[in-house]
Image: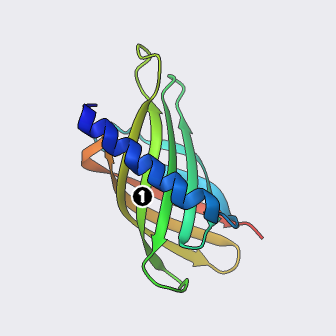
């Protein structure tokens, strides 16, 4: 990652955490996130926790593989409407860490943005789809994922 790319990743990383952490109010859903393979990202399933916030939702996901690869993502999903609606479209800002190469001593930063769609089913379940460009991991092909989970009371 070059100097420009590293600064950009750090700025988006800080933006996600500064906007997201103070506004966390409650757990919204706990479930699984499936990463659909494209580019350097393999097919992965990992846990994801989403939180209700003032601006939309915050999400934390962790993906581990048997061969030692790790992907940890934190996302801020910003609502496009003032009030929550059924079937909402969100702007997603994502930052995280990935560790794909055992020859490196430290994980690498990643940052990016995309679009997410969230749809609750009754009071108990929620599903979502997202597509996002993550520098340097998911460029030029975007990272597509599917989320399904149980809503927390």
Q: For this rendering, which residue is in front, 12 or 65?
A: 12
Instruction: Name the image quarter holding the N terminus.
Output: top left
Q: What is the secondary structure assignment of the residue under circle 1?
A: strand
Residue at 46%, 84% (x, y): give it: 81
Instruction: Name the image quarter holding the C terminus.
Output: bottom right
Q: For this rendering, which residue is in front, 138 or 20?
A: 20
Residue farthest left in this picture = 140
Determine crowd level at label 1: few under 14, some 14-19, many 20+ residues with C-alpha closer than 10 A. Answer: many
In the image, 29: left or right of 45?
Answer: right
Q: Position of residue 130 (x, y in %)?
A: 41, 61
Residue at 54%, 72% (x, y): give it: 56
Q: Position of residue 94 (x, y in %)?
A: 43, 53
Residue farthest right in this picture = 153
Per the image, the residue denoted by label 1 is 93
Asked if one can make out residue 85 in the rendered structure from this viewpoint, the answer is yes
Residue at 47%, 22% (x, y): give it: 106
Q: Is residue 122 placed above or below 144 in the rendered structure?
A: below
Q: Quadrant of residue 5?
A: top left
**Colouring method of the image:** rainbow
Q: Is residue 137 placed above or below 91 in the rendered structure?
A: above
Q: Position of residue 11 (x, y in %)?
A: 39, 48
Q: For this rendering, which residue is in front, 80 or 120?
A: 80
Q: Is residue 152 placed above or below 121 in the rendered structure?
A: above
Asked if one can make out residue 35 in the rendered structure from this viewpoint, the answer is no
Residue at 54%, 86% (x, y): give it: 83
In the image, 141: left or right of 11?
Answer: left
Q: Is residue 19 placed above or below 141 in the rendered structure?
A: below
Count of numbered tags: 1
Q: Position of residue 116 (x, y in %)?
A: 42, 66
């Amino acid at each position: 990652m070059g100097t420009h790319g590293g600064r950009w990743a750090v700025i988006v990383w800080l933006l996600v955490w500064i906007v997201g952490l103070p506004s966390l109010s409650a757990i919204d859903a706990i479930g699984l996130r499936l990463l659909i393979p494209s580019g350097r990202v393999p097919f992965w399933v990992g846990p994801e926790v989403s939180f209700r916030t003032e601006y939309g939702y915050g999400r934390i996901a962790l993906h581990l593989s048997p061969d030692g690869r790790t992907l940890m993502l934190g996302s801020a999903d910003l609502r496009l409407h003032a009030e929550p609606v059924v079937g909402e479209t969100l702007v997603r800002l994502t930052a995280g860490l990935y560790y794909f190469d055992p020859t490196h001593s430290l994980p690498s930063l990643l940052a990016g943005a995309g679009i997410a769609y969230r749809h609750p089913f009754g009071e108990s379940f929620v599903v979502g789809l997202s597509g996002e460009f993550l520098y340097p991991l998911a460029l030029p092909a975007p990272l597509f994922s599917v989320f399904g989970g149980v809503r927390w009371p």
